[in-house]
Image (cartoon, rainbow, N blue to C red):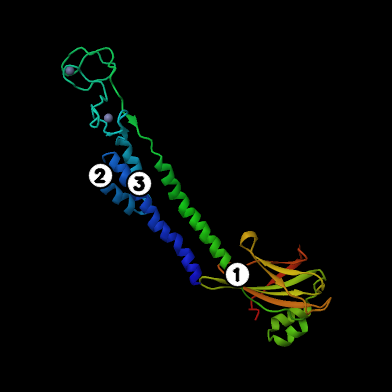
Amino acid sequence: MSGITIIMLLPLLVIIIAVPLLVGVYVYRDASSRGMNAVLWTLLAVLAPSLIGFIIYLLVRGSYSNLKCRVCGERLREDYMVCPGCGAKLRPSCPNCSAPVEPDWKLCPRCAAPLPEQQTDIAAPVKKKDRTLPVILAAVILVPLVLILLSVAAFTTESTMSSATALLSVDDYIQETGNTQIREWLSKKKPADNQAAVLRYEIDTDDETVTQYLIYIPSLSESAEYTVESGSGFFGDSIDVDISDKGEGSDALMSISFTSGDAVDISITCEGEKMQCEIEDVKEPLD
Ligand SMILES: [Zn+2]
Ligand SMILES: [Zn+2]
């Protein structure tokens, strides 16, 4: 059980530590580059539950500039007239009073001086591309998802057989067991030669389900290989049944029990082919 607990807790730890760390570093750097209050936004993004702070940050930051100088790469703000790094002229201005003007204005609105037709020495700022955000978003979404899937897989794989008893003949089994329900069932049951009859009992406790099976194969074929498979596909488990000390045509009983998060289904194959299996649920334990 401790193995399961650690595997289940690991993704939670990663989500609790790694994702806020990633978001925190990103927000701090991005907010600094936009002249926003980096510490405040980082705290908000990291500490607000369910990444709400990060989402708010992404919405709010749009109104802050992410401009840089076309000439020297210096970070710029929306209201800068010239680049503080290299002095490049960032937007048209009045040649008389230096007030900022729009390119299509004819007169300066502040000093009424006529403006030149076109100002050619303008190095308009460029928008910085944010290549990190898609990576962060992918990580924020994918990391927990992948980890949860892995832990589910790990958890499901843990749900293996907890015990299997050796094959017994019906006569031996009846002698050994004091279970009248099984005795009655065996005395009435006579499945066809190529079929198996199965009793199933399930009990749910708080955090796990125990599934018990009693498998009755009425006529073994000596050279065949029998396998009991549990679960399905990827998460399944299979047990080869050893029939080496049983004679051709003899009957056989085997009990298997599983402990897992959920009820476990089984199928029985003989020489790779699924045997027809008649499963009967009972209300009393099979031991
Ligand atoms: Zn510059
Ligand atoms: Zn002017």
Ligand 2 shows up in which quadrant of the image? top left
Marks 2/1: CA distance? 54 Å
Marks 1/3: CA distance? 43 Å
Please name whichever residue, 110 or 192, is drawn nearer the observer in this view of the structure.
110
Residue 92 in the image: above or below residue 64: above
**Label 2 beta carbon less than 8 Å to ligand 1:** no
- Where is residue 282? Give x, y as percent: 66, 74
Q: Residues within 10 Å of mark 1 (few under 14, many from 20)?
A: some
Question: Viewer-nearest of labels 1 and 3?
Answer: 3
Please name whichever residue, 65 or 59, is drawn nearer the observer in this view of the structure.
65
Q: Secondary structure at mark 1?
A: loop
Tag 2–tag 3 contact (CB < 8 Å): no
Mark 2 or mark 3: name the one nearer the start of the chain. 3
Mark 2 or mark 1: name the one nearer the start of the chain. 2
**Mark 2 highlights which residue?**
37
Q: Secondary structure at mark 3?
A: helix
**Mark 3 highlights which residue?**
26
Residue 63 located left or right of residue 254: left
- Where is residue 232? Give x, y as percent: 64, 61
Marks 2/3: CA distance? 13 Å
Taking the spot 26% from the left edge, 41% from the top edge, the residue there is: 36
**Mark 1 highlights which residue?**
160
**Label 3 beta carbon less than 8 Å to ligand 1:** no
Please name whichever residue, 95 or 73, is drawn nearer the observer in this view of the structure.
73
Q: Quadrant of residue 213?
A: bottom right
Residue 104 in the image: above or below residue 162: above
Question: Viewer-nearest of labels 2 and 3?
Answer: 3
- Where is residue 287? Give x, y as percent: 65, 81
**Label 1 beta carbon less than 8 Å to ligand 1:** no
Name the amino acid type tagged 1.
Thr
